Every structure is written in C-alpha cells, then in structure tokens.
Amino acid sequence: MAVRTAVNPPATEVAPVTLVVGEEEFLVDRVVRDMIAAAHGPARWSIEPAAAGTMEHRAGAAQDSVPAGDLHDLDGSELGPGELESLTSPSLFGGGCVLVVRAAQNASKEVAAELARYAKNPAPDVVLILTHAGGAKGKELLAGVKATGARVIECPKLTRFAERLDFIRAEFRRAGLRADDGAARALLDAVGSDLRELAAACSQLAADTDGSRVGIDEAVVARYYRGRAEATGFTVADRAVEGHLAQALEQLRWALATGVSPVLICSALAQGVRLLGRVGSAPRGASSAALAAEVGAPPWKIDRVRQQLRGWHPNGIARALHAVAEADAQVKGEAASAAYALERAVRRIVASRAGEDLS
C-alpha cells in the first residue's frame, strides 16, 4: 500500500483505486480534481446523467480539460446496492471511466462491502477514487480498502501554525517560486488561516509579482497587501514580541508611512502582548484547540504565541503590558506624536523581553 501524506498531496499518478483520507476539504477536493485531470488528459468528459447534477460544482476546472470517457461523481450515501457493478462496467463506446465516491463513510454496509470487494480486483480502464473522512464511521470500509494495497493519500486537518506555513511554501513551489519564512508569516497574517483563501492569495501573488526573479519575501507580500491595516499592525506586533527591534521599527515606520492608523497598530501590539500573558499562564499540557476556545484565538495563533514566548519572563510580560497601556492612551490624544509613542512602546516591549526596563 502506497501511503502519501503531504501539505499538497501528489495526485498526478493514476492508480486503479485511490483512497483519499482526511478532513481537510480543500486538499481532498484538489486531489480529486487533479486525479480526474490526470486520468483523462486534455479532451472532454462524457458525463453520465446520474453524475451530471454533481459534476458542475465538483469537477470545476477539470471540465475544460478532460477527455472522452465517463465520469461518475457522487456521494457514498447516493450509491445503492448493485450500482457499483453497472458504473464500472465497460462502456459500449470504450474510453474507460472515472468513478469518484465522496464521503465513502456514508455508504451503506452493503455498498461498503461491495467497494471493499471491488478494490481487491478492480476493473480494467476504470479509475476509482474514494474519499473518506478517516473517523470511526465507515472504519470497516477504510480498513478493507487499505488492506487491498490501494493507493492512499492522507489529507489531515491542518491545525498548527507551522503546518500552515508549510502549506504556503508548498503553494508557491507549485507555482515554481520560492517563498521564505517571512513571506509565509506575512501572508498568513494578511489573509488568515482558510486554506482556500491562502491558496488563492499565493496564486495571485505568483501571477502579479516579479517573484520569478527574486522569490517571494516579506517585502513583496507587504507591498501587495498595502492597505491591509490588520496585517500591518500584527506584523509590527509579531516582530516586537519576538525581540526583533530593527524589523519591528522598520515595519512600524512603513505602516505609518502608508497611512495605517496608529490606533490599529497599538491595538495589535496590545493583543500580541495580552496573548503572551494568557497563553504563558495556561497549563503546559493544554491543547492548542482547547486554549484557542478559551482565549478566543485560532489554534494556529496559539502555536505561534507559544513559539514567541521563548525568552519571555512573567515580569517582562507585565512591563510590556504597562508599555502598551501607556501607548494606547497616548495615541488616542495624550501625546503630541502618535508615531513617537508607538516607537517608544515597541522599544519597551523588546527591552522587556530582554529583561530590561526602559520606563
């Protein structure tokens, strides 16, 4: 059994039976789409009436670049006993077929048994693609198909911050570009954690920038997302709590020069330091998901904060909180220069991490 686990699972190899396992819907859908295209190459589909209702929204981009041959695309719950044999029977016109059974865990016991038996002896000129959530439901089918030696592609849920960074870097590699860690982090801040939105952003950046010559770095992302105040403010905060004074000041000055509100930047600084305190005081064994629900931040953000906590002491966090509280009052009218107040806050945050007090 060939098992592959990857942020972007390779799906260009066509196997008689492939099992796509996992709950990351975006990756599962893309694997299926890529395999359909790989199985049929550059012609047109002959869509069977039973599958026509599901093909429009599931095959997507593959419709314009597919060949002669049948495509059956349906949910496991829609497949009735005995239908598998008719769907995989040779066509009078030849050309073979692709059968996609999505959410195979929803298949009835009879159908699940038929699928497991079929996987032992697949029909020629037929490509069977099964998707399965991977949980306890339908586990007999999952085990049965795996036991036949079918190709398995794992698409587990990406919940950790590092996994999303890997995903972004892999997306740029798909476009033939290289992205450094700073670019991946900046894009994650700007776009958020939804994989579809991240993939679209990577594709757009690759198409619209000159990254093919210089690669994608943080500066490229910053220029492209100029005006995204939330991303800019959080980038300043991240550099500050990580102790990178020069980078934090550079990002702060760039943000102010491009019109980002000082109030938004100060808010991002405050949120970054508060998260340090809340995550740092939580039990070490607490899961990212549980802690995320408690503090109101996504799990990937909890993973990032845990990395940022290295080097911090509780007394330093307390001093940093005091610094941002003062800055908040100053940028809202108590100081003559909001820019000076923010720069001073950034310096005090970085100094607090190093155990110094610039009060």
Image (spheres, helix red, strand yellow):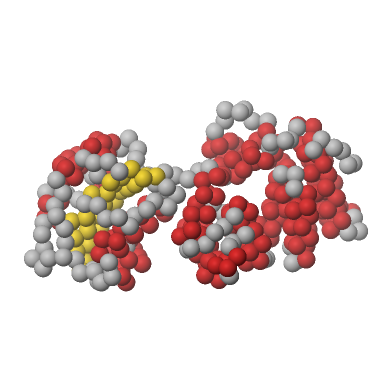
> Total label count?
0
Which percent across, then down, holds residue 284? 61, 28
| Viewer-closest of 350 and 329 | 350
| Viewer-closest of 165 and 85 | 165
Q: Quadrant of residue 286?
A: top right
Q: Does residue 278 appear in this view?
A: no
| Viewer-closest of 45 and 178 | 178
Q: Quadrant of residue 107?
A: top left
Which percent across, then down, holds residue 141? 24, 39
Q: Does residue 44 appear in this view?
A: yes
Q: In which quarter of the image is the C terminus?
A: top right
9 is higher (above) or lower (below) than 287:
below
Left or right: 166, with 348 as reference point: left
- The residue depicted at 24 percent of the width and 52 percent of the height is 15
- The residue depicted at 56 percent of the width and 42 percent of the height is 299
- The residue depicted at 82 percent of the width and 41 percent of the height is 351
Q: In which quarter of the image is residue 12?
A: bottom left
Which percent across, then down, holds residue 331? 83, 55
